[in-house]
Image (tube, rainbow, N blue to C red):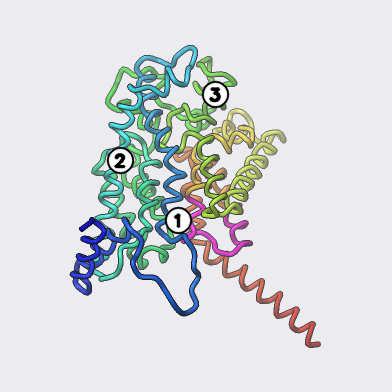
Amino acid sequence: MGLKEKLHKLKLKYKGKKMAPAFNALHTFLYLPNETTHSGAHVRAADDLKRTMNTVIISLIPCLLFGIFNAGYQHYAAINGFPESFSLFRDFINWDNFVIGAWTVLPLVVVSYGVGLAVEFVFAVIKGHEVEEGYLVTGMLVPLIVPVDIPLWMLAIAVIFGVIIGKEVFGGTGMNILNPALTIRAFLFFAYPTWMSGDKVWVHGAVERADTPDAISGETILGGLAQGKEILTAAGTKGNEIAYSISEAFYGFIPGSVGETSKLLILIGAGFLIFTKVASWRIILSGFVGAAIMGLLFNGIVDAGWITESSKFYGLMSTPFWQHLIIGSIAFGVVFMATDPVSGSQTNKGKWIYGFLIGFISILIRVFNPAYPEGVFLAILLMNVFAPTIDHYVVQGNVKKRMKRLKLKTA
């Protein structure tokens, strides 16, 4: 008797009992359900929630693998300095970087999935409903949006909070109004701010290593711009310039959250999600457009002379609008977070408005909140709350248009 048959027998044995959801979840995760519909109005398709979640996970795997190598690369760069002539396979994709990265990143993945799924199973058994696959994506997103050295116990507490408060209290998968992964990150930021911000948290071992050189202490590009520094056109350190170039920011060879540094891989993931029709291209495109327009407005204010170099906002306001799309977490947030089909807008017109406001507000927070120079996650959570309102007015607008056309036809 094979594993599939054994699990099916256990499923039948525990049918109707308290632990039935646990066996059903394991069986349906590994295999297709044995039952199929034969009558009634049903949409017959090859995809289901599990396949949709797996598609998103596949799009995130390149970011995870890159984050593993980048964790090791940043660690050794903080000790030995950046190489004078960078070679991808010699300096980045090597065994030493992989070992350090895997040692620090993979435990985050294990804790995220282990704790999150445990909470899901507990609630399924208590409530007597099926275990839903919604946490499959959340479990992968969480390790990618936190610093590499975040203590595992902090992550575990945040995951418990995010799953319970962000999802289960609303009824589980499909009922939550907030993105669970962002709820977890928000909890970490406000409960343990010293582990979620600053220059040292983005490089493995930098918090404990007092002899880390200041030039490569782990300062992010956003942190440098907030201090009035300038982005280099080529890598290096000179005067009041940031140690990373815009090309390094695009390819991802910079400190930052585990999975958010490589904009190239994020764009590839976006293309894959759009091609498979899992993510809304309207939200992604409008998110980038909203961020660009906000950046253009700030550039216009600087060009008009309304803000001088002595202002604490000058650095980020004078940053060219297109660079705002490359630096920070806005690309990762717009592609993988804002497109959450549960907490985002559902109507086509609402998606345009929803995505635009996320990008617009992200740059607004980035510029005017020096204590938190990355605003995309807060912007998405804010728009999660307003998404139902946006859809309501879109639907009401369509109803009024149809009623007006009906009156014209009957007149």
Q: CA distance from mark 2 to mark 1?
A: 23 Å
The quarter holding residue 234 reads: top right
Q: In the rendered view of the protein, which quadrant contains the C terminus?
A: bottom right
Q: Which mark is on residue 108?
A: 2
Looking at the picture, which amino acid does disc 1 mark? Thr
The residue that appears at 62% across and 50% down in the rendered structure is 286
Mark toward the viewer: 1 or 3 = 1
Residue at left 53%, top 14%? 238
Label 3, residues with CA under 10 Å away: few <14, some 14-19, many ≥20: some
Q: Could you tell which of marks 2 and 1 lies nearer the N-terminus?
A: 1
Secondary structure of residue under mark 3: strand
- Residue found at x 70% / y 80%: 403
Whether residue 161 is in magenta: the answer is no
Magenta segment: 337-356
As drawn, 271 above or below 169: above
Residue indicated by mark 3? 245
